[in-house]
């Protein structure tokens, strides 16, 4: 994700290195926040808060953990706190459909409904299950990286993922039968 030399330079007080480091991780931070919060404005707020926290806490990062798991822990904790403070809102703009000339409109509509239903199903999961699903399937973290990021035992991560998959399977059973809600 980020070169260790850049991290060390940022920790030693090199302002340019710190700015470069933050620029390199800002899209990743925002993407994680968006996947967890499912709201553009909340994700931007959470990402900004996370980048500020990384900026102020870079000196406390120890190379015992991977840098990306340290960053993920910060982002995920901020998102969970934010989610607890306010119920997420849904922006109408996020759900507008734009059709391109050469695409199959029916496929576009069906995939839009599927993505919406999957997102809604993920939103119904308890906070920690949602966080592990996002980190595992949307950020492609390993079980160990998730455990490090969320400061959870490995077996707890596996348990959360197992329960989340069961709950998602139940919530999305229409798709398993070949149907689409809409």
Image: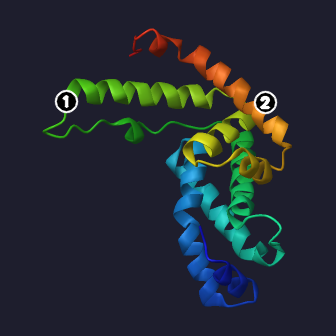
Residue shown at the point (38%, 41%) measured from the top left? 93
* Relative side of 63 to 26, left or right: right
Q: Nearer the viewer, residue 47 or 140?
A: 140
Residue shown at the point (54%, 27%) measured from the top left? 120
Q: Where does residue 16 sit, x and y in percent of width and height?
A: 60, 89
**Residue that badge 2 annotates:** 159
Q: Where does residue 129 sit, x and y in percent of width and height?
A: 71, 33
Residue 131 in sight in this render: yes
* Relative side of 113 to 39, left or right: left
Q: Earlier in the sequence, mark 2 or mark 1?
A: 1
Q: Residue furthest right?
A: 153
* Relative side of 79 to 1, left or right: right
Residue 42 in sight in this render: no
The quarter holding residue 105 reads top left
The quarter holding residue 58 reads bottom right
The answer to whether residue 8 is above or below residue 107 is below
Quick one: SS at disc 2?
Answer: helix
The quarter holding residue 182 reads top left
**Residue that badge 1 annotates:** 104
Q: Where does residue 130 sit, x and y in percent of width and height?
A: 67, 36
Image quadrant where one finds the N terminus: bottom right
Residue shown at the point (83%, 68%) measured from the top left? 64
The answer to whether residue 149 is above or below residue 126 is below
């Amino acid at each position: 994700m980020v070169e260790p030399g850049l991290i060390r330079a940022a920790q030693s007080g090199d302002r340019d290195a710190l700015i470069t480091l933050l620029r390199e991780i800002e899209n990743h931070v925002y993407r994680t926040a968006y996947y967890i919060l499912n709201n553009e404005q909340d994700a931007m707020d959470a990402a900004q808060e996370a980048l500020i926290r990384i900026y102020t806490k870079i000196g406390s990062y120890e190379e015992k953990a991977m840098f990306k798991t340290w960053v993920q822990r910060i982002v995920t904790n901020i998102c969970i706190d934010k989610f607890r403070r306010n119920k997420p809102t849904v922006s109408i703009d996020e759900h507008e459909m734009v059709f391109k000339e050469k695409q199959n409109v029916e496929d576009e509509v069906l995939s839009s409904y599927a993505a919406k239903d999957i997102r809604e199903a993920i939103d119904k999961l308890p906070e920690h299950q949602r966080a592990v699903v996002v980190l595992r399937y949307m950020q492609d973290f390993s079980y160990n990286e998730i455990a490090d990021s969320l400061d959870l035992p490995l077996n707890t991560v596996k348990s959360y993922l197992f329960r989340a998959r069961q709950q998602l399977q139940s919530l999305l059973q229409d798709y398993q039968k070949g149907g689409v809600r809409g």
